[in-house]
Amino acid sequence: MSNPVRSLNFIEHIVEEDLAKGMPGKQLRFRFPPEPNGYLHIGHASSICLNFGLGLRYNAPVNLRFDDTNPIKEEQEFVDAIKKDVEWLGYTWETECYASDYFQQLYDWALFLIKSGKAYVDSQTSEEMARQKGTPTEAGTESPYRNRSIEENLTLFEGMKNGDFEEGTHVLRAKIDMASSNMLMRDPIMYRILHKAHHRTNTDWCIYPMYDWTHGESDYIEQVSHSLCTLEFAPHRELYDWFLDQLVDSDRLRPKQREFARRNLSHTVVSKRKLLKLVEDGVVSGWDDPRMPTISGLRRRGYTPESIRNFADTIGIAKRENIVDVSLLEFHIREHLNKIAPRVMAVLRPVKIVITNYPEGEEEWLETENNPEDPEAGVRKVPFSRELYIESDDFREEANRRFFRLKLGGEVRLKSAYIIKAEHCIKDDKGEVTEIHCTYDPKSRSGSGTEESMRKVKGTLHWVSVSHALPAEIRLYDRLFTDENPDGYKDRDFMEFLNRDSLEIVTGQLEPSLVSAEPGDRFQFQRLGYFCVDADSSSEKLVLNRTVTLRDTWAKIEQKKE
């Protein structure tokens, strides 16, 4: 059966129309242009998949360009993290570019605009300029410096570049239209003075270009054919085109900006400012905390590149913003890990059972499948003995008929092992069950072929042999916010919706096969969920993060609320 043909998204329709109008396919070029002032998040992943996906679809190059025009916030650490994230997602860029590579060219073009009477140095304060901007319904007023002579503008601009002036004393503005209905066209700032060292150019420059001046010109220098931005940049397109109108050579490709909608993820925030607050306030351990929506956080939590790419493909590209339920992202990681993750047994909240009629000092190694979804995954052997751990929630002294786990007088099957029956239990001074005494049917071992082994009981439990158990720190992560849209309230702070139970740490007991597990290894803990070995693990202490539960437990919580 052939695969169904996927319909084109509206961005692909734009590209197809340009090709149909005569654009040579070899002129197609895309770019992903992050600012290196933080870590990439799940929203960036959609943009990465869009741009690099177009590159793969049309066999066109894709540049990785760092929009590094603000030395106050940008660091090499973020550059390195971004490159790692893009590579981890499975993409390769054609050229690694930096806006700072073009500082000299941008400066030369700014001189050209000054000489053409289309840019001027403004010496007002930022407050004065803001007042003169006007409103969306009222025209702005011209700066008293708008008609400075070309010679004076050139002298001042050179002094700005040479560091002769303090920050805030002058800016370079484009001379466009202070009455434009688009307020971005009301003489926008092109350069400001910043006496800050840049992570690449150090102190070579004392002036730094603004985004709107840098964006389109960088696209033009790199000959990007389609500059894809999120919807908040739609009003900027007019200015993007105006700057290009002043400079484009008819013999070279003119880039075009087009916009698509952000896909916001429920139960999270993606504003870099708000993510930084979570880090600085100690709500999370860092940018790569597994509760963070950053790509590095998702990677540490155990998400796979395939699951994130499949998620991005599922939500697609749209013209309107909306909130995508995080359960869809969780569905994709469950679907992928179900195919590839080895099954192992682990007990997170252990209580001991003693099989009283099992010979003391004896043990046996029972065969079990590594992954029933993968016939080539093979089998392994796990140790079975007289004393075992099971989950404390899997036992009740008394229970109704709908409780299919272990209860006094009741039977269950131990996964890949025997049928046991609970006879009595021992409690501590607080009334907590500390030990359950059971008996087992020696002829009921799974796969032994006996009539007893075929006997059906309603419950099957996972377990770990006490004498062979491997203790480990288990970090049970959950959603960071209780509200679907914590960022969507004008009168409430997003921090009010923090999920105080987003992390629980327990000491679990694992089957001994995990003794050789390495950071990044992923497993399904049977009946519990998917887990990933954390980078904090060492030879002395194993640490695992819960990636996701086996089922959407939040759906049940929401149903109860209703």
Image (cartoon, rainbow, N blue to C red):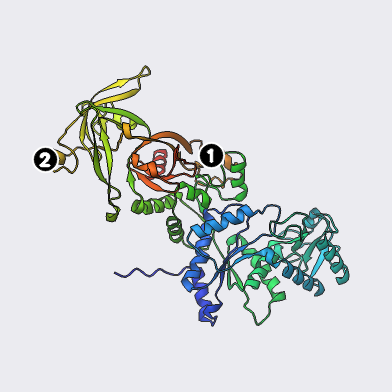
On-image quarter of the N terminus: bottom left
Q: Residue at x 77, y 56 (%)?
A: 194
Mark 1 nearby-residue class (10 Å; few <14, some 14–19, many ≥20): some
- Residues 165 and 403: in front is 165
454 relative to 353, above or below:
below
Tell whether label 1 touches label 2 (CB within 8 Å).
Answer: no
List the residue tagged with mark 1.
Answer: 498
Q: Does residue 210 appear in the picture of this structure?
A: yes
- Residues 424 and 518: in front is 518
- Residues 119 and 165: in front is 165
Q: CA distance from mark 2 to mark 1?
A: 54 Å
Spot occupied by residue 521 in the image (x, y as percentages of width and height) = 41, 48
List the residue tagged with mark 2.
Answer: 451
Spot occupied by residue 545 in the image (x, y as percentages of width and height) = 44, 42
Residue 232 left/right relative to 179:
left
Three-letter code, disc 2? Glu
On-image quarter of the C terminus: top left
Residue 155 left/right relative to 270:
right
User: In this rendering, which labeled residue sits more in front, label 2 or label 1?
Assistant: 2
114 relative to 306, above or below:
below
Spot occupied by residue 119 in the image (x, y as percentages of width and height) = 79, 69
Residue 488 left/right relative to 447:
right
Spot occupied by residue 455 in the image (x, y as percentages of width and height) = 15, 39
Pick whichever of labels 2 and 1 is earlier in the sequence. 2
Q: Residue at x 81, y 54 (%)?
A: 167
Residue furthest to the left: 451
Residue 412 left/right relative to 122:
left
Q: Does residue 147 appear in the picture of this structure?
A: no
Badge number at residue 311: none
550 relative to 189, above or below:
above
Q: Residue at x 62, y 43 (%)?
A: 277
